[in-house]
Amino acid sequence: MAIEALYVHVPYCQAKCRYCDFDSVACRSKEELDEYTAGMSACIEAFARRGDLVACLTAYLGGGTPTLLGERLPGLVEKIRDAAPSLRELTCEANPESLTRELAYALCDAGATRISLGVQAFDDTELSELGRIHTSARAHAAIEAARDAGLDVSIDLMCGIPLQTTESWGATLDEAVASGVGHISVYPLTVEEGTPFDRMCAAGELDEPDEDFQAWCMDEARRALVSAGYHPYEVASYARPGKECQHNVAYWTGVSYLGLGRSAASMLDRETYDGLRDLLGLDKVPGEVRRVRISQKTDALPFGQGAGPAYDCELLTEREAAAEDLMLGMRMTRGVPADLIDRARAVVGADAVDAALARAVSEGLALWVEQDARFCPTERGWLMGNELFGIMWDLACP
């Protein structure tokens, strides 16, 4: 199996949001941005010379805030396009304050097809509480600039945030729909360890998110967005027809993907891992391993001078990979096809798989869609994803 998806991490942000535990750092100098862009470009060029990305169908520049690279970013997009001639989709993450009209047009000209904007809310007071440095007006301007440039636009929204009310959440959803974007992702706020919000909660300066309110927000988002013509194609995302993020879909359908940059994650089947092992400085793995998940721990890039990157690796057997495929497939509203279940039955054992599916059905978490020969999550399964995912992952253990 070849690499079908590429993720490139840009670790810089203009400011750290109060809820964020992503691996990002404050942008320190023009020279640092120049050095990072040059190093990543050289890395991508090296993969291009080897032909490792010729079958790659999607690419995603994430962060951090890739648009902080400014005029350097279109050049990086062009490098990815040259290295991966089969690309169908190329997404750049952006924050509204750093996506200008000029940059949006330059990204489109360079070969980007999508922009994913971290909007979070259309209420300035809520944005300030989150530590965001853009305003609602700036978010609308960025959306308009990206759409005018010819880019597909996705926005992220967050619910259960400080000072948010039922009225303000409804207004945010209304503004999101009215903006005309093709893709909307909705996430409940999570207070992560070590973040400013975590410290504020510990000091009694901030209440923990209200899970009941968040559940109401998620239900309201589903009602409002579906009625506006969006469909929930995966657990956190809604899209108009034809506007689904194909890179998202790649993550949930078991294809091999490569991540470059500190904290970037890769998932490689055994054959692809063996083909890249020497190049990336990875260890040999035992013969029973069929899938390897990799997370880069250091700043170094492959092909650079000196020591290469260091990685954390998770090794999966054939049984674990089969269980993982079922678990990941349950993140998609289309679920998993019958042939994937047949493969799991052959690897794990028919009795165990059938019992797990029967349990998911009996608990109202999933059902068979006979006309499509697929096993799909129900709305209850969508709301109680951890329970459904756990049933599938339990199949990894004999």
Image (spheres, helix red, strand yellow):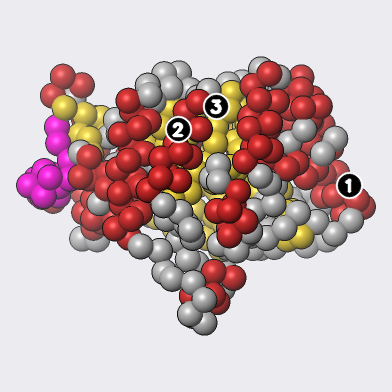
Extent of the magenta region: 354-368
Quarter occupied by residue 153: top right
Disc 3 on helix, strand or loop?
loop
Looking at the image, is mark 3 or mark 1 earlier in the sequence? 1
Please name the residue that numbered disc 1 is placed on. 34
Quick check: can you spot residue 61? no
Q: How many marks?
A: 3
Disc 2 on helix, strand or loop?
helix
Please name the residue that numbered disc 2 is placed on. 174
Magenta span: chief secondary structure: helix
Please name the residue that numbered disc 3 is placed on. 179
Looking at the image, is mark 1 or mark 2 earlier in the sequence? 1
Q: Is residue 61 magenta?
A: no
Quarter occupied by residue 106: top right
- Within-10-Å neighbours for mark 3: few <14, some 14–19, many 20+: some
Q: Measuring 69% from the left and 38% from the top, which residue is drawn there? A: 138
> Residue 57, how many percent across, how many down?
56, 26
Circle nearer the viewer, 3 or 1: 3
- Within-10-Å neighbours for mark 2: few <14, some 14–19, many 20+: some
Q: Measuring 14% from the left and 32% from the top, which residue is drawn there? A: 368
Please, what is the three-letter code of the amino acid marked with disc 1? Asp
Disc 1 on helix, strand or loop?
helix
Camera-side residue of 248 and 135: 135
Q: Measuring 35% from the left and 54% from the top, which residue is drawn there? A: 214
Asked if 333 appears above or below 381 in the picture, the reply is above
- Circles 1 and 2, Cβ within 8 Å, touching? The answer is no
Camera-side residue of 190 and 108: 190
